[in-house]
Amino acid sequence: MKSLVLIVHASLQQDLADSLRGLVSGFTFSHVEGHGRHTEQDPVLSARDKVVGFIPRVRVDILLDDTEVQTVIEHIRQISGIRDHGIYWVNDVLDHGRM
């Protein structure tokens, strides 16, 4: 089992959610803010975002079987506007369940 974590610009949340609904069994969105070295060059940022220095982003957490990870990543890369506006990482999940 793997945990796929994405951080994308908040403006992409709806498109990402629509795309993921038919692809995975579930996902979680968390609203976060961040700052990185590409902040100043980001064309989707408002003047406010550039002045404040923190960019509204969405963190997406998805639990996947090991065999699904690359398929989901490739699918997400095809979403319009997401290229160069997000990062991801994959972690091993040692245990999971419901409380």
Image (tube, rainbow, N blue to C red):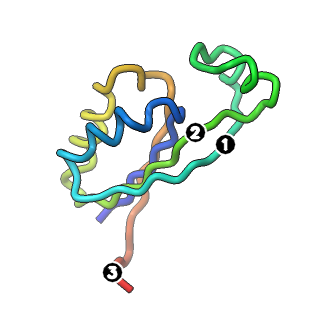
Kindly indicate whether the residue at mark 1 contacts the one at mark 3 (C-beta within 8 angstroms): no
Question: Which residue is at a point 50% across and 36% down the rendered structure image?
Answer: 8
| Residues at marks 2 and 3, CA–CA distance in whole angstroms | 28 Å
Q: Position of residue 20 (x, y in %)?
A: 27, 44
Kindly indicate whether the residue at mark 3 contacts the one at mark 2 (C-beta within 8 angstroms): no
* 5 displayed left or right of 53: left
- Give the position of the C terminus as an image quadrant: bottom left
Question: Which residue is at a point 44% across and 49% down the rendered structure image?
Answer: 60
Query: Mark 1 = which residue?
Result: 33
Give the class, few, some or many, for how many residues have Cα within 10 Å of label 3's Cα (few <14, many ≥20). few
For this orientation, the residue located farthest to the bottom is: 99
Amino acid type, residue under disc 2 in the picture: Arg
Question: Which element type, helix, strand or loop, lies under badge 3?
Answer: loop
Of marks 2 and 3, which one's residue comes earlier in the chain? Answer: 2
| Residues at marks 3 and 1, CA–CA distance in whole angstroms | 29 Å
Q: Quadrant of residue 70?
A: top left
Q: Nearer the viewer, mark 2 or mark 3?
A: 2
Question: Which residue is at a point 18% across and 45% down the rendered structure image?
Answer: 22
Question: Which element type, helix, strand or loop, lies under badge 2?
Answer: strand
Kindly indicate whether the residue at mark 2 contacts the one at mark 1 (C-beta within 8 angstroms): yes
Question: Which element type, helix, strand or loop, lies under badge 1?
Answer: strand
Q: Position of residue 26 (x, y in %)?
A: 29, 58
Query: Mark 3 = which residue?
Result: 97
Question: Which residue is at a point 51% across and 48% down the rendered structure image?
Answer: 59
Q: Position of residue 92 (x, y in %)?
A: 39, 63
Give the class, few, some or many, for how many residues have Cα within 10 Å of label 2's Cα (few <14, many ≥20). many
Give the class, few, some or many, for how many residues have Cα within 10 Å of label 1's Cα (few <14, many ≥20). some
| Residues at marks 1 and 2, CA–CA distance in whole angstroms | 5 Å
Of marks 3 and 1, which one's residue comes earlier in the chain? Answer: 1
Amino acid type, residue under disc 1 in the picture: Glu
Amino acid type, residue under disc 3 in the picture: Gly
